[in-house]
Amino acid sequence: MAAVGRIHFVVEFLERKYGAFAISRLIMMSGVPVRSFTATTPDDREALQKVRAAVMNLLSRDEFEELLRAAALEGREPWDT
Amino acid sequence: MGYVRAAVGVSSAGDTDSAVEEAVRRARAGMSGVDPALVFLTATVDHDASDVFNRVRSQFPGARIHGSTTSLGVLCPDGVVMGNGGAVGVLLVGGDGLDTHAGSAVIKDDPEAAGRAAAEALGDRSPAVLLFSVAPGAEEAVLRGVRGVLGDVPIFGGSAADHAIAGDWSVFTDDGPFRSAVSLVSIAGDVAVGAHFLSPYRPTEARAEVTGAQGRTITEIDGKPASETLHAWIGDSIAQQVEAGGNVLAQTAFRPLGLPLATSTGDRYLAIHPASIRAEDGAVNVFAQVPLGTKVCVMDGDAEGLIGALDTLIEEAKKAGGGFIPRAGFLIYCAGCAGAVGQALDAGLRDAWKRGLDGVPMLGLCSFGEQGTLPEIGPVHANLSMSLVLLGDR
């Protein structure tokens, strides 16, 4: 489980797939300034939980599973299980 | 006979210098040499508002500047514009016979006084329409102040917005950008105006009385903690927030509260967006005042309806203008609606504009509150709503 950069990973995935508008929506729904998180930003549990809740609202079940698969390919889990 | 000339320019460039330069260059190209009297300006908060304003002001030293920062992205006839470094948009409006005045005030302790001060600064007491831009928080009081000076002038506009609801927004006034301010621009002269305001939801039969409210917090509905009623109306998608508190913007964007306003043809409903739940007492924070004793209902909507409403908005605004030729559009679309609709807003807006106003320049923003004027009711502040002001040739 990565200890850094998980929000950045989620942002990169969403932006690549759905564009910058999706990231604005993620910021609005989570209240987390996700663009300020880099690949080396230590994971913040509270921020991760908010981002997860917002992502689950933004994505369909299939899209959410695609995010999980993309994370698995990189040996990651986007959030604590 | 006067005429209106308008052109829009947008940019998703990441650095502010390039973004403003591109947006202005594109818009200027459509003006055929006509100097703008008014610059309607918006940008996301990814750009520094002062930097945006100063660069635009240096390009148009003699024009009124009016607008605000937008949430999510910039709206234009091509759809939603947003880059990974933000977006900027300008709508230039000029022409022969167009008469504009600007007034603004910083909002401090007394928002009603700020509304009065901005209206008094206008110097125009009978405009055809008043464009309104305001910081979120006390829109009702600001509107009261404006109305106290100008009476029943049609008012349309939106509340400044950021992405994270973190207070990073700015209102672009003619005197510069301010976090907490109201900006007014009056439109008069030899110009035709058509405008419309709507909340794109259907009222349901589920109703209850607000029995406790303070400002923009509903503490009790039907004598119970407000979150209990909301939970029953919205369902278990907000169960976690009812239990532990938190943001319910997404879950309530298709099921807002409805505030009835009586008219001779029946009740009209203003949409009120529940933003968050306070776990300790079950209070629900909303983005507008709900008077004690109001019988609110839960309203019903969906993504298709929120996009389809753009067709209605366009047609009603055109109808309101009579037999005019629309030349410019000012669109306000609630950020909560835009967030709920998601990616589909891009094509939905593009298609609706092409169907209804193909070729007419338009700039829009995603706001944190919407203000409009309703027949028999007057100026209102609501949430999850949209408005369109069209200027045109008679």
Image (spheres, coloured by chain):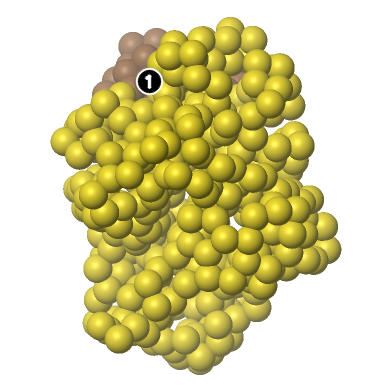
Chain colours: A brown, B yellow
How far from the left and from the top, in percent, is residue B354? Answer: 20, 31
For disc 1, the neighbor class at 10 Å (few under 14, some 14 to 19, many from 20) is some
- Residue plotted at (25% across, 59% down): B301
Count of numbered circles in the view: 1
Q: Does the rendering let one see residue B54?
A: yes
The chain that hosts pointer 1 is A
Which amino acid type is marked by label 1? Gly
Asked whether, in this view, residue B341 is left or right of residue B145, the answer is: left
How far from the left and from the top, in percent, is residue B246? Answer: 55, 56
- Residue plotted at (59% across, 43% down): B100
Which of these two is toward me, B87 or A76? Answer: B87
How far from the left and from the top, in percent, is residue A4? Answer: 59, 19
Which of these two is toward me, B110 or B299? Answer: B110
Asked whether, in this view, residue B199 is left or right of residue B83, the answer is: left
Which type of secondary structure does the marked residue at label 1 adopt? loop
- Residue plotted at (43% across, 14% down): B32
Q: Which residue is mark 1?
A: A19
Q: Residue furthest right?
A: B109
Which of these two is toward me, A64 or B326? Answer: B326
Q: Residue furthest front?
A: B1
- Residue plotted at (49% across, 38% down): B97
Image quadrant where residue B322 sits: bottom left
Image quadrant where residue B359 sits: top left
Q: Does the rendering let one see residue B286?
A: no
Q: Quarter of the image containing the C terminus of chain A?
A: top left
